[in-house]
Image (tube, grey):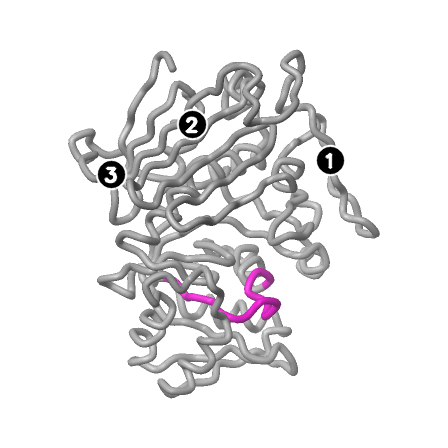
Amino acid sequence: MTDVTTRVFAPPGDFLALKSSEPLLFELAEKLWEPAATGNAGNAIVIEVVRSAPRSKDFGEYREDIDFLEGAGRVEAAALPPPPPRGVVDPTFSFEEKQRWKHEVSEFRCEVPGAFDVRIDLVSARIRAVLAPPLSLSLSKKSPSSLSSSLMSFLARTLLEAPAAVLLARRGWRALHAGGVSGPKGAVVVRGGSGAGKSTLVAAAHAAGLTVLGDESLLVARVDPGALAASVRELTLRADSAVLLGILASTAPAFSGGEEKRRVELFEGSNPGTREARRVTTLLLGPRAPGPARLVPLEPAQFLLEFAKGEIPQEHVDGGAASIARAWAEAGGTRLDGASDLAGAVSLLKGLVS
């Protein structure tokens, strides 16, 4: 690889060295993490992004005589009002639908056939992303202003943010299945089982002016459980929820969690300051109906039982979820009931962080 540049960034509580000949990637990284001095790179996470040799068998079949980033079809949500028409076909949904993660003992792998292959070495804390020629050629002749916000978000999320989060969650942080919103006073963690309404509530809070840390995953500091950071800072929700909130027209097609969803764009206005916050409290989602929305105080033992309803296998590295729960339970906790009253639930959230 020629003309390789190395720049060091500072994800919360860590350092990361990005090596690439693709200038666009550094511009995307600046929206995620603060720049850091090169001298801090001694024990840093390393992300190396390289171009594959032409016709690499690793990427399947592709044509080199088309603009790769404008060659995929779009998907519309069936039986729902269509979003505004787009002047250029956006391939983001196609990429997301084809994306595959493979988890092994010492390595994670993320691949979009025909586009890129990312390998995360858990032992050496090194990430190597290999770009297929059509993708690298397209990136080299484009600037962020010429890409759709959804495509910029996808590239940053898949090549930089998610791989880094895998390693951060094995260093100074623990991974947690939860959403989070923040305001002037700090952040509220929103936790519940699948289908409990985390994403809908976070989206409603975002529409009301609160900052989103994430809708499905957060990082919690190992040495300070009050310190929170974004893992993968995104917001996707079901189309019917987007219709309920009146935001369908401002969302983009997304494929997340094995199903078609709608994505609320967060990346365009992203900056490193939106990725950290101090925890004010944790709201465990209880029965959504009947309303009105209300906060129910929980004793530590109750908090632990309710907290466990949101557990998923991915957060059990080093007993992460249980450790976080014990630390937070000491101060008691709160359950949010009646969140079908979204306006009332958002008002309660705003009151906690504003």
Residue situated in front as seen by the camera: 51 or 306: 51
- Kindly tell me whether residue 274 is visible in this rendering: no
Circle 1 packing at 10 Å, graded few (<14), some (14-19), many (20+), is few
Q: Is 190 inside the magenta-drawn segment?
A: yes
Horizontal and vertical percent for residue 236? Answer: 59, 52
Mark 2 lies on residue: 25
Tag 1: amino acid: Arg
Q: Is 161 inside the magenta-drawn segment?
A: no
Tag 3: amino acid: Ala
Q: Are marks 2 and 3 in contact (CB under 8 Å)?
A: no
Q: Which residues are magenta?
A: 187-200
Q: Nearer the viewer, mark 3 or mark 1?
A: 3
Mark 3 lies on residue: 44
For label 1, the SS is: loop
| Label 3 – label 1 distance at C-alpha | 38 Å
Q: Residue at x 62, y 56 (%)?
A: 237
